[in-house]
Image (cartoon, rainbow, N blue to C red):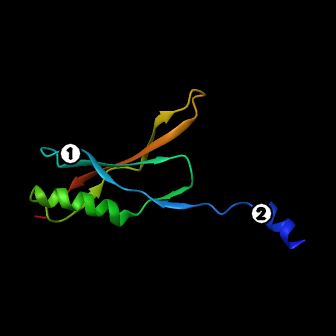
Amino acid sequence: MAALLAACAAPTPTHHRTNWFLLDANRADRILTTAADYGSRGNWEIHRADIARVVNEKCAEWGYNDGASALGDVESTCIGKTFGRRCTRTRLSIKYQCIKKP
């Protein structure tokens, strides 16, 4: 009986950590766009510390050592589709602005 119940149980979802990268940077406006691409399998976790590392590194390179502030929410865009038009790859992106305290 236990084997039968185990066979019917839903599989445990696999959690994947997203790899954030700098997608776009506008030094004049101090605006950075970070992004992460992922496939359709498993559950993807957003770790804000990973994003902060990418953003803070670029802001510091430009002379803004006080971090950055998010501009809006996470945007999701389909970047890969099957012939049946089902999304197979998604890009998450978040815009930030570098901060310089007075």
Q: Quadrant of residue 83?
A: top right
Frontmost residue, 56 versus 69 = 56
Q: What residue type is labelled 2?
A: Ala
Residue receiving disc 2 = 9
Q: Is residue 46 above or below residue 85?
A: below
Q: What element carries label 2?
A: loop
Point out the residue furthest to the bottom here: 2
Mark 2 or 1: in front is 2
Residue receiving disc 1 = 25
Q: What residue type is labelled 1?
A: Ala
Between the residue at mark 2 and the residue at mark 1, the CA separation in whole angstroms equals 46 Å
Q: Residue at x 56, y 50 (%)?
A: 41
**Left or right: where does residue 78 sit relative to residue 95?**
right
Q: Which residue is drawn at 22% across and 61% down?
A: 56
Q: Quadrant of the N terminus?
A: bottom right
Frontmost residue, 23 versus 42 = 42
Q: State the image coordinates of residue 26 (x, y, percent, origin top left).
A: 17, 43
Q: What element carries label 1?
A: strand
Q: State the image coordinates of residue 73 (x, y, percent, origin top left).
A: 40, 50
